[in-house]
Image (cartoon, rainbow, N blue to C red):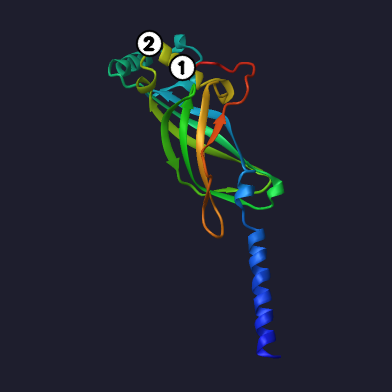
Amino acid sequence: MSKFNLFSRATALTAVLFLSACATMITPTELSKVKFSLDRVSAVQLAGINLMEIDTLDELNMFQIARASMAVSRQSLPLDLTLHLKSENPLANQVAARLIRMDWTLVLDGRDTISGSMEKNIQMAAGESQDIPLNLSLNMFEFFDEKSALDMLDLALAFAAEDGMMPQGVALKIRPTIDTMFGPITYGSPLLIESRSESKGQRQVF
């Protein structure tokens, strides 16, 4: 066999392998098909008080009231919670996606509040959904100083609703980065993920 024929076959094989590799990598078009939604809230604490076990302010005991009062007097009312984002990689993509980074901003009533970045390796198989927990912490005095202490306590309780239901007025701006065999692909502009449409029991608080 001539050297020319060997070179031609090698070139053709390389082209086939390259096209096969491209077929298994997620493209920017497919990337847009990976859906994100706000799922639920868990582990809500205010000034170290577990709000997941409290339905109304009347249920606070004297020690919890004292702790909240001390935090208010210092104008430091830390709200800590875990916000669960759900990703869905459609089966039609036929390729797995791997989330390696996500920049985020918490939006309350249309107002940007805290921002951060999550750096984890999260596999998103085609046809499956994935839970993405974000640990958030903000000082309520920085964003709700025009409200009374009781109002801020009530706002915090809204995050600890039954079944982790997301209160209205909560949204998240995200800019995910997905890893591929040819390097990471980042969304061109942030996505605004809003809470689901109003449902029974969902609270409008912000």
- From what the image shows, is residue 101 above or below residue 22? above
Locate residue 115 relative to residue 167 in the image: left or right.
left
Q: At numbered mark 1, what does the secondary structure look like: helix, strand or loop?
A: helix
**Near-viewer residue (5 or 183):** 5
Q: Quadrant of the N terminus?
A: bottom right
Q: Position of residue 14 (x, y in %)?
A: 64, 73
Q: Position of residue 192 (x, y in %)?
A: 54, 33
Name the residue: 44% across, 28% down: 112
Q: Are marks 1 and 2 in contact (CB under 8 Å)?
A: no
**Hey, what amino acid is under mark 2?**
Ser
Locate residue 66 relative to residue 35 in the image: left or right.
left
Q: At numbered mark 2, what does the secondary structure look like: helix, strand or loop?
A: loop
**Near-viewer residue (201 or 184):** 184
* Residue ranking furthest to the left: 74
Category of crowding for the residue at label 1, using alpha-carbon neighbours closer than 10 angstroms: few (below 14), some (14–19), many (at least 20) = some
Q: Which residue is mark 2?
A: 148
Mark 1 → mark 2, Cα distance in angstroms: 11 Å
Which of the 4 image quadrants contains residue 165?
Answer: top right
Q: Which residue is mark 1?
A: 155
- From what the image shows, is residue 157 above or below residue 96? above
**Hey, what amino acid is under mark 1?**
Leu
Locate residue 150 relative to residue 174 in the image: left or right.
left
Count up the numbered dots. Answer: 2
Name the residue: 56% across, 25% down: 164
Q: Position of residue 92 (x, y in %)?
A: 71, 48
Q: Position of residue 53 (x, y in %)?
A: 49, 20
* Residue ranking furthest to the bottom: 1
Ranked by sequence position, the earlier of labels 1 and 2 is: 2
Q: Label for residue 56?
A: none
Category of crowding for the residue at label 2, using alpha-carbon neighbours closer than 10 angstroms: few (below 14), some (14–19), many (at least 20) = few
